[in-house]
Amino acid sequence: MSALNKRTVTLREQAEAQRSQLTSECEKLMRFLDQEERAAFSRLEDEEMRLEKRLLDNIAALEHHGSSLRDLLRHLMLTGELSEAKMLSTVKDFYLNCRRQLISPSIFPVQLRRVEYSFPLQYSALQKVIQHFTDNVTLDLKTAHPNLLISKDRTCVTFTKKRQRIPGSSSFTKSPVVLGIPHFNSGRHFWEVQVGKKPKWAIGICKADSSIGERQSPNPWGYWRIVWQGDSFNVSGADPDSRLKAARATSIGVFLDYELGEVSFYGMPEKCHLYTFRDTFSGPVCPYFYIGPQSEPLRLCSATDSEC
């Protein structure tokens, strides 16, 4: 009974810890949203005031132009009372005066710059993630299938029909797969993978300490990945396989929150959310890349890349 009570206490403590963490995360998110809202409204107000000033200046210029036209029209009507010679001289002066004075001001277009106030929540939040948590992930040559050609900087991989190396004890041999480094056992991490128009690929994470036998089993445990095949996404890993209703993406962003037990996938550069796995990680995990039996390359984007 004592052991059961201890388990109950432990369960309650774990639940309370998760509640506290969830509350903290929600508070951080609310603060972020509040800051983004105030900053966006401030930018919008500044832009509104700038455009309003230019509009008022434009209205004043148009009113001055209209006043000048009325004055010249009255002056022209008075020339009808002059002699013919005097009228010709006056009309000539009038014409020259018109050319100097009557430069019509342009009409100012009133249109707010959309970038000043348009900030989709998902876009803004993910942009912050990219700025603060991007890691320089590279390919681990020791794990690469022997038919995979790895670039010198370890950021690009291509499937070839010719063996590139003798497989080692950590290499995949049944599927064209390579793992990434570094390994993660805490924190938040983001990386982006350019997949282009490859007809088949899989990207995600896996347990870094699993044996090569476990990795190459038909249904490996400890994998969290999305798969593109033909014209649709599938997901596999901690949750049962399911089909996603999402359009093809040329790049995939992966965001790992280790403590929260989440790995999320985003279609880039649109930054649209594709899927999130929720699980509990009990050891180090590492990036996972299934290349597919096609010659198109798969490329990792560096933290300094503005565009992948």
Image: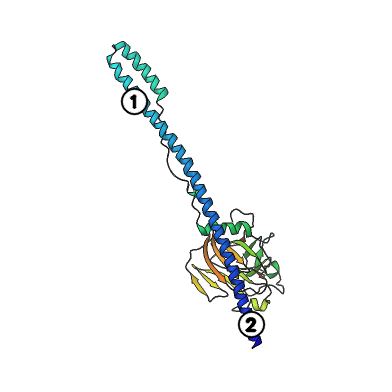
Amino acid beneath label 1? Arg
* Quadrant for the C terminus in the image: bottom right
Which SS class for mark 1? helix
**Does label 2 or label 1 sit earlier along the sequence?**
2
| Image quadrant where residue 144 sits | bottom right
In the picture, measured across the screen, residue 76 lies left or right of residue 178, that is left
Kindly identify the residue that appears in the image at 60 percent across and 77 percent down: 12
Kindly identify the residue that appears in the image at 37 percent across and 20 percent down: 95
Q: Position of residue 67 (x, y in %)?
A: 36, 27
Residue 45 in view: yes
| Image quadrant where residue 159 sits | bottom right
* Quadrant for the N terminus in the image: bottom right
Q: Nearer the viewer, residue 87 or 19?
A: 19
Residue 295 in view: no
| Mark 1 residue crowding within 10 angstroms, few (<14) / some (14–19) / many (20+) | few
Q: Which mark is residue 84?
A: none
